[in-house]
């Protein structure tokens, strides 16, 4: 599928999710923040990611618009005075939580390409009284910030939606300051998965257009220039998860059990931009 088509599908999906919250017609979707509002949610990927204390710190609409697969703000080490950028910030849940962590001397940016989500995020910013927050319109493949701008890049189940993940990771590297951290939640796969199986389980993965295999993720991060790369599973999905989510789909889950059981996982992906750029080889002594 062409990159532009993928982008338009994502914009439409997330625009509709924002409108469902602002129009008060229900939670963002079954793979949204319904569990936080006390509604039973059938999606094992996006439910129960934020605790009650965090829910109390932000407007309910930010929680309802969440379409993530993890909680990067709980796992990323954020310090007062730091600048944070959330790629694909949606209704602003992780931006607002980050803003509280970095305090009034810090700054939290959210980047999103969907007008409806940006409108919702800015309204949530107003309700939260967050003065150290700024939402930007743009694409994660073309971050509208200068080089060496932020201390931490976070994201929540968004990088897998991009058709050009290499460019996303290069852009994240570019805007990070030397020594800056990449700390995102994403869905990744373990080992090779047959294309037919991958297509069959896209409904299960729900909000994901194309999860990377974990070694491929490491390779792309390294190619972008990152070091100290770690992928830490936070949820490993079993066949029971697939059976619950696909009960309405007509897919024979038991027939594909061996190919999907423990093959998909939500993970926290960490990496660091070196404090000094790698020196280019300029002579025979450094090329041995």
Image (spheres, helix red, strand yellow):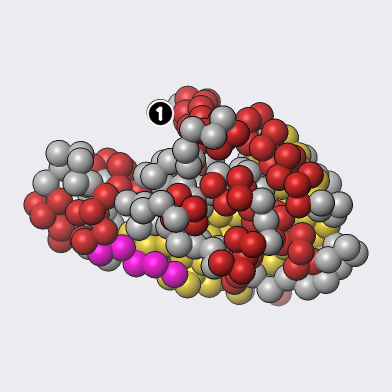
Using the image as rendered, state which of residue 123 and residue 278 is in the foreground.
123
Secondary element under disc 1, as helix, strand or loop, is loop
Question: Percent from the top left, x then y, of residue 187?
Answer: 43, 56
Using the image as rendered, state which of residue 34 and residue 229 is in the foreground.
34
Q: 167 left or right of 81? A: left
- In this view, the residue farthest toward the right is 105
- In this view, the residue farthest toward the left is 255
Considering only vertical position in the picture, is 225 above or below 5?
A: below
Number of residues whose C-alpha sits closer than 10 Å to that of mark 1, classed few (under 14), some (14–19) or many (20 or more): few
- The quadrant of the picture occupied by the C terminus is bottom right
The residue that label 1 is drawn on is 1
Question: Percent from the top left, x then y, of residue 86?
Answer: 67, 52
Q: 102 left or right of 192? A: right
Considering only vertical position in the picture, is 141 above or below 47?
A: above
Question: Percent from the top left, x then y, of residue 147?
Answer: 82, 51
- Kindly tell me whether residue 232 is visible in this rendering: yes
Region of the chain picked out in magenta, as a range: 234-238
- Kindly tell me whether residue 213 is visible in this rendering: no
- The residue that appears at 61% across and 50% down in the rendered structure is 60
- The residue that appears at 15% across and 58% down in the rendered structure is 257
Q: 75 left or right of 109? A: left
- The quadrant of the picture occupied by the N terminus is top left
Using the image as rendered, state which of residue 102 and residue 34 is in the foreground.
34
- Magenta span: chief secondary structure: strand
- Is 236 a magenta residue? yes
Using the image as rendered, state which of residue 216 and residue 236 is in the foreground.
236
- Is 193 a magenta residue? no
Question: Percent from the top left, x then y, of residue 158?
Answer: 54, 47
- The residue that appears at 39% across and 56% down in the rendered structure is 45
- The residue that appears at 21% across and 61% down in the rendered structure is 240
């Amino acid at each position: 599928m062409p990159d532009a088509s993928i982008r338009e599908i994502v914009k439409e999906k997330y625009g509709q999710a924002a409108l469902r919250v602002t129009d008060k017609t229900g939670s963002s979707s079954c793979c949204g923040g319904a569990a936080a509002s006390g509604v039973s949610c059938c999606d094992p990927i996006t439910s129960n990611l934020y605790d009650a204390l965090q829910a109390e710190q932000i407007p309910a609409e930010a929680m309802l618009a969440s379409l993530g697969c993890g909680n990067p703000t709980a796992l990323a080490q954020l310090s007062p005075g730091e600048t944070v950028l959330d790629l694909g910030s949606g209704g602003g849940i992780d931006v607002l939580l980050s803003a509280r962590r970095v305090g009034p001397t810090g700054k939290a940016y959210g980047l999103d390409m969907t007008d409806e989500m940006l409108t919702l995020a800015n309204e949530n910013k107003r309700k939260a009284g967050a003065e150290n927050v700024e939402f930007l319109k743009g694409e994660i493949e073309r971050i509208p910030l200068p080089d060496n701008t932020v201390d931490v890049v976070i994201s929540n189940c968004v990088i897998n939606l991009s058709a050009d993940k290499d460019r996303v990771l290069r852009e994240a590297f570019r805007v990070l300051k030397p020594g800056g951290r990449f700390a995102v939640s994403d869905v990744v796969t373990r080992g090779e998965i047959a294309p037919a199986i991958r297509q069959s389980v896209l409904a299960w993965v729900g909000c994901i257009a194309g999860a990377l295999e974990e070694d491929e993720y490491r390779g792309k991060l390294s190619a972008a220039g990152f070091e100290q790369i770690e992928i830490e599973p936070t949820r490993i999905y079993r066949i029971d998860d697939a059976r619950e989510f696909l009960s309405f789909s007509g897919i024979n889950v038991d027939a594909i059990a061996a190919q999907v059981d423990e093959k998909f996982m939500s993970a926290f992906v960490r990496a660091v931009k070196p404090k000094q750029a790698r020196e280019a080889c300029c002579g025979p002594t450094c090329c041995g």
